[in-house]
Image (cartoon, grey):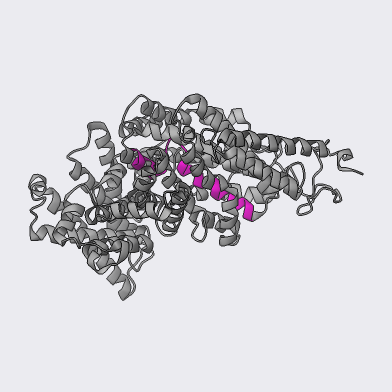
């Protein structure tokens, strides 16, 4: 019997691993009526919550918890105060922020102990505690030295005294040690290289050879001016990022995470591959309030990964979907990764322009994950959740709709022209007020203070990375390496933009193996992005390109933190999961190339071209998904698979450039025609197919 005469009903499926046209049809072996249940949300207690449950006696543990609570909660309240009444003198504000973050970094990642409150039982424990105390005292000493007479301190710029050199050196050492604990050795090594190069460039060779910089000038730039430690990265972190993370921490305290997951499951759970689609939607929701890929994996993945495995997805694929969807949170407006705020400062545009520019690429990315999930579900005969066992969408929405109003307030304030700091403040106030609508979301005073602490603790790694990135930027600036590096990259690429972009992407991925997304972006923006802009790329497209390839490192082997976190939940091999993640998240590698050559996807240029380009890119990614999965209404023969691949390439080309002497829209139309031919051929071959 030919393929065209086979009939398939909605209740039938292929046996897992045997989904091949012409093979024997079997009864469905994976149940669809999988009951829906959401586990209790778990969160790690902070200093304040541990203090409230600690024994009612005064001792070393209580003293440490009190000190940690005062620093974290006090710093959160300080940032809210600044949002209302405006920042004090700029250096003072950033210095207070950095002092608090350095102190918390030492307390959160203590030396030679598992916890800062762990009992001191051995000599190494006492030594670690003593070193921690010395570092904290040194941090406060630097703060007092700087702020005791801030005007006199500023006047000494260019005419510093010996104590200024010593204090500046102490601060740099404290930042490097905090970076080692909060971020990792890789960033310390990279930063140390640039510092050593700046001071001893005459001992290097080739591109890195140059005149050395005197230690006095080095401290002038990195410590006493706003071009180093206290430059744009730390400014953005202290001014904008902290309040947005506090907003996200408060939103999560209202059980918004549960609301987002239930909303996503009610929307997609009953569809083919519903649980995986719910993971993509829920992680997209969570991405609007959290810029951390690993945090998103832990929050939504603890529920979605087991559920995906339960209905029939391969555990490795389930983990990859969650890793890709969660890492997409950093590119999802309105609260993107910390680097998005820094992009706005670097190119001198309002943050709202970054939000708008990021919208279409984010949609394309999540749409591609959705496509891959759907095709994998058909190919593997994955079950779906029974609609009767799912939460009702309108009931779920009725229980938590008002939480979305806080996000709406934040976005509207940004669109009305308010600064991100002020918009975040109004969002926080609106969220606290709205939380009282229902008892289960109501925030008590302890909840609010704990959320402040949680937000500040979540900002520690970002702040330390920004301070350390300031050391890199200052070193590159004072040594003149940035200009030499830009020119050298252009020469290596031979003026070929594709080669230049490839070098940029590879550099970002390599850097991302050891440092955070924010630090990756800042480093690439300082060294390579100027060369990309010089090659004729729109500034916003060049910076977004570096940002995307900084984010993609979280799912790219060999060091793919989001994939590894998902693999731990799914109990799958970490490296195999990371490789699977690169396949599922292919759009994150392609989207930057597409919008560099076609910046209309970032709303640069006429709106009609933006809309055409978006539709064309969406079609191209759908066709590419068919080619990569090798499945459409059954397993695709190699010829059809190759045809879809060629069609996808044509559709993903920008429509407004010249290619081999011809307008590129000819190739786009050819790609559309080729895809349509194979699409219709496949439809005819599989008449009667349904899932």
Asked where in the image residue 124 lies, by quadrant, the reply is: bottom left
Of 286 and 118, nearer the camera is: 286
Residue 421 is one of the magenta-drawn residues: no
**Which residue is painted at 63% across and 31% down in the image?**
392
Q: Is residue 80 above or below residue 178?
A: above
Of 498 and 375, nearer the camera is: 498
Number of numbered discs overlaid on the protein picture: 0
Quadrant where the N terminus sits is top right
Magenta segment: 316-344
Is any part of residue 686 visible from this angle? no
Quadrant where the C terminus sits is top right
x, y percent for residue 328: 50, 44
Q: Residue furthest bottom?
A: 123
x, y percent for residue 684: 81, 36
Q: Is residue 573 left or right of residue 177?
A: right
x, y percent for residue 105: 32, 56
State whether the magenta stretch is mostly helix, strand or loop: helix
Q: Residue furthest front?
A: 661
x, y percent for residue 314: 67, 53
Residue 327 is one of the magenta-drawn residues: yes
Asked where in the image residue 646 lies, by quadrant, the reply is: top right
Is any part of residue 284 visible from this angle? yes
Of 513 and 175, nearer the camera is: 513
Q: Is residue 152 left or right of residue 540?
A: left
Of 318 and 490, nearer the camera is: 490
Q: Residue furthest right?
A: 1
Asked where in the image residue 429 lies, by quadrant, the reply is: top left
């Amino acid at each position: 019997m030919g393929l065209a005469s086979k009939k398939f009903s909605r209740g039938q499926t292929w046996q897992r691993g045997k989904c091949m046209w012409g093979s024997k049809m079997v009864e469905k072996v994976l149940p669809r009526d999988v009951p829906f249940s959401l586990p209790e949300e778990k969160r790690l207690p902070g200093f304040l919550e541990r203090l409230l449950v600690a024994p009612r006696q005064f001792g070393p543990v209580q003293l440490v918890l009190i000190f940690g609570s005062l620093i974290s909660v006090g710093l959160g309240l300080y940032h809210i105060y600044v949002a209302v009444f405006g920042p004090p003198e700029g250096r003072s504000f950033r210095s207070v922020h950095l002092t608090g973050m350095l102190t918390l970094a030492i307390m959160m990642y203590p030396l030679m102990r598992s916890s800062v409150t762990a009992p001191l039982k051995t000599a190494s424990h006492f030594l670690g505690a003593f070193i921690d105390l010395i570092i904290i005292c040194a941090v406060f000493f630097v703060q007092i030295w700087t702020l005791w007479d801030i005007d006199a301190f500023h006047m000494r710029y260019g005419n510093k005294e010996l104590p200024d050199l010593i204090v500046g050196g102490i601060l740099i050492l404290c930042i490097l040690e905090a970076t080692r604990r909060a971020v990792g050795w890789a960033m310390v090594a990279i930063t140390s290289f640039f510092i050593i190069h700046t001071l001893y460039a005459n001992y290097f060779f080739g591109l890195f050879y140059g005149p050395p910089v005197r230690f006095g000038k080095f401290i002038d730039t990195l410590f006493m001016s706003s071009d180093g430690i206290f430059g744009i990265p730390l400014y953005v972190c202290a001014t904008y990022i902290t309040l947005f993370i506090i907003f996200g921490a408060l939103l999560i305290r209202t059980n918004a995470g549960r609301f987002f997951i239930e909303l996503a499951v009610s929307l997609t759970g009953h569809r083919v591959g519903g649980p995986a689609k719910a993971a993509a939607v829920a992680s997209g929701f969570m991405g609007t309030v959290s810029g951390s890929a690993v945090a998103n994996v832990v929050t939504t993945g603890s529920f979605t990964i087991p559920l995906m495995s339960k209905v029939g997805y391969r555990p490795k694929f389930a983990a990859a979907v969650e890793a890709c969807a969660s890492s997409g949170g950093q590119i999802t407006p309105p609260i993107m990764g910390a680097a998005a705020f820094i992009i706005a400062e670097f190119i001198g545009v309002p943050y709202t322009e970054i939000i708008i520019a990021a919208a279409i690429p984010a949609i394309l990315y999540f749409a591609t994950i959705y496509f891959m999930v759907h095709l994998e579900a058909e190919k593997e005969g994955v079950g779906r959740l029974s609609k009767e066992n799912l939460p009702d969408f309108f009931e779920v929405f009725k229980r938590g709709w008002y939480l979305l109003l806080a996000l709406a307030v934040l976005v509207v304030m940004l669109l009305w022209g308010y600064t991100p700091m002020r918009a975040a403040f109004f969002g926080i106030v609106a969220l606290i007020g709205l939380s009282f609508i229902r008892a289960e979301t109501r925030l008590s005073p302890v909840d609010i203070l704990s959320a402040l602490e949680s937000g500040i603790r979540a900002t520690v790694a970002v702040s330390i990375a920004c301070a350390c990135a300031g050391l890199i930027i200052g070193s590159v600036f004072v040594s003149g390496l940035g200009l030499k590096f830009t020119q050298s990259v252009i020469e290596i690429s031979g003026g070929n933009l594709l080669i230049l972009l490839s070098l940029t992407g590879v550099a970002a991925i390599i850097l991302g193996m050891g440092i955070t997304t924010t630090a990756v972006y800042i480093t690439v923006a300082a060294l390579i992005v100027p060369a990309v802009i010089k090659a004729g790329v729109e500034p916003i497209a060049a910076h977004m390109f570096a940002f995307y390839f900084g984010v993609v490192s979280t799912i790219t082997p060999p060091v793919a933190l989001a994939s590894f976190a998902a693999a731990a939940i799914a109990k799958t091999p970490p490296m195999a999961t990371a490789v699977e993640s690169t396949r599922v998240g292919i759009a994150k590698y392609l989207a930057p190339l597409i919008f560099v050559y076609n910046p209309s996807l970032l709303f640069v240029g006429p709106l009609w071209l933006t809309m055409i380009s978006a539709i064309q890119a969406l079609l191209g990614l759908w066709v590419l998904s068919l080619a990569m999965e090798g499945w459409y209404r059954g397993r695709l023969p190699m010829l059809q698979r190759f045809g879809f691949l060629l069609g996808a390439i044509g559709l993903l080309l920008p429509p407004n450039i010249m290619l081999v002497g011809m307008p590129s829209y000819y190739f786009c139309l050819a790609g559309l025609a080729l895809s349509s031919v194979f699409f219709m051929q496949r439809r005819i071959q599989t008449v009667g197919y349904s899932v």
